[in-house]
Amino acid sequence: MKYLKQATILFGITMAGEFLNYVLPLPVPAGVYGLFILLGFLCFGVIKVEEVSEAGDFFLDIMPLTFIPAGAGLLNSMGQMRDILVPLLVITAVSTVFVMILTAKVAQGLVRRPRKKEGI
């Protein structure tokens, strides 16, 4: 029953993200809205991590399976991508390196950030 409650919370937040995607005229995927909603709820204490951790771990464990249909779709459209394969590979490599560098810089900034002492 605990897992059902946790999954319901996560799916409810996902549906709220879908609703925001429908209402707001911004080019932002619904999943991103849902992630920001979840982040806000976790940061402001509306939801505690323990209330969604097991279901979240389960969804992270099965996440690679969700990429199988997308990979199959890419393989099916390989003939159409042959003309742009070199630019596609260059863009993919450059953007991957950019994301890795940006992630490392943000992580370094967070680690080096002075922490507030508790109880003050």
Image (cartoon, helix red, strand yellow):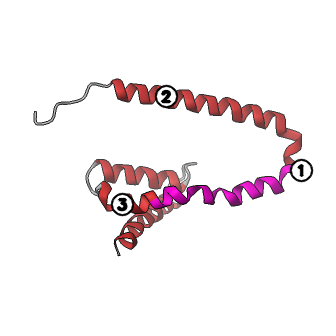
Magenta residues, start to end:
58-79
Q: Secondary structure at mark 2?
A: helix
Residue 28 lies in the magenta-colored region: no
Three-letter amino acid code of the residue under disc 3: Val
**Label drawn at residue 79:** 1
Q: Main secondary structure of the magenta part?
A: helix
Task: Mark 2 and mark 1 in contact? Answer it, CB < 8 Å.
Answer: no
Q: Is residue 120 left or right of residue 3?
A: left
Q: Which residue is mark 2?
A: 104
Quarter occupied by residue 56: bottom left
At 52% across and 28% down in the image, what residue appears?
A: 102
Q: Earlier in the sequence, mark 2 or mark 3?
A: 3
Q: Secondary structure at mark 3?
A: loop
Residue 68 lies in the magenta-colored region: yes
At 75% across and 31% down in the image, what residue appears?
A: 90
**Label drawn at residue 52:** 3
Can you tell which of label 3 and label 1 is closer to the viewer?
3
**How far separated are the C-alphas under marks 2 and 3?**
27 Å
